[in-house]
Amino acid sequence: MKKLVCVSSFSSGVKHRFALLNQVKNFGDLHGYNVHFLWGVSRGVAYCRWEEFFGTISGLQVTNIPEAEVAHIAKLSETQDWIDRKRESFDFVQEGEPLTNRLFAYNLKASSYLERLTPLECRPKMRLLAPPAQHIRLAVAAIAAQHGLGDRVGIRVRVTECRHDKRRPHRNQSELEECLDPLLQVDPGLPVFIVTDSEYIQQRLAAHFGNATWLPKEFDLIENGTRYVHRSDKPAMFTFLKEAFCLCECRRVINIGGFLNDQAARIWPPPYSEAAAALTALAV
């Protein structure tokens, strides 16, 4: 039996983890591997277990493992070509090395290599979607009904905490203002649902749009004079999951920085003012 085990770094968030899983599962399904996903119960997901967030995925085995085990796997991937786990031996996926029947893919470097080995025509048209756990699914349905998300434009602004991240904006005032500028050109009468980890972004958008709504959250991390959601906070992580699934319920989404399952949302490309004007015209 061919088997492919994968795990992401312990600091990675849910979107990173599903990007890795999508790449690995596409390769595994094409080449007949049973895919086993190790979910790190670690700081990147506020030490939450898989089943607290998600339901089952057909053809996928998931096992929760502690942060220390993920860190140990990371070290082994740098020093040797193989790993023993649960009385089974696996070869680490490494670019240019032969692929065996027992493979272990650590983080995006390995999974991205497997994706390059998967022809475009063999990849599903839709990337793998994260299935919400039942309690999250029910909460999202209630929020969508309460706030009329089907008639709203979601505005997602993800402010990255990593200085070396290629995504913008970073946590500095000039980039926050640069990000806000095109959003504040949108018709203020448009009904919106705001999702951001920046208190400043939320306040500016809420002041601009007369019909704005959002989920309550704590901005208890201060950096460069502005406040952000603390990513290691467990209640904040559950709020983020609900927000992500809520965005997919919105009529359209302005997406800056990405969110879980954004491939399933109805994204409005820039320029946002023109997109929003077109949407307003349709509603008249």
Image: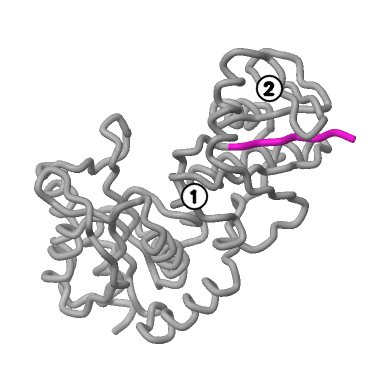
Q: At x 81% / y 29%, what residue is drawn?
A: 88
- In this view, the residue farthest toward the right is 1
Q: Secondary structure at mark 1?
A: helix
List x then y, in percent, for residue 262: 46, 56
Label whose residue precedes the other's in the sequence (2 or 1): 1
Question: Looking at the image, which residue is at 85% across and 33% down?
Answer: 2
Q: Is residue 91 visible?
A: yes
Which amino acid type is shown beneath numbered disc 2?
A: Phe
Question: To which residue does mark 1 refer?
Answer: 14
Circle 1: residue type: Val
Looking at the rendering, the stretch of residues picked out in magenta corresponds to 1-7
Q: Looking at the image, which is closer to me, 63 or 172? A: 63
Q: Residue at the location (59% across, 13% down)?
A: 79
Residue that label 2 marks = 92
**Other residues around mark 2 within 10 Å, as few (<14) / some (14–19) / many (≥20):** many
Please provide percent x and percent y for residue 278.
29, 69
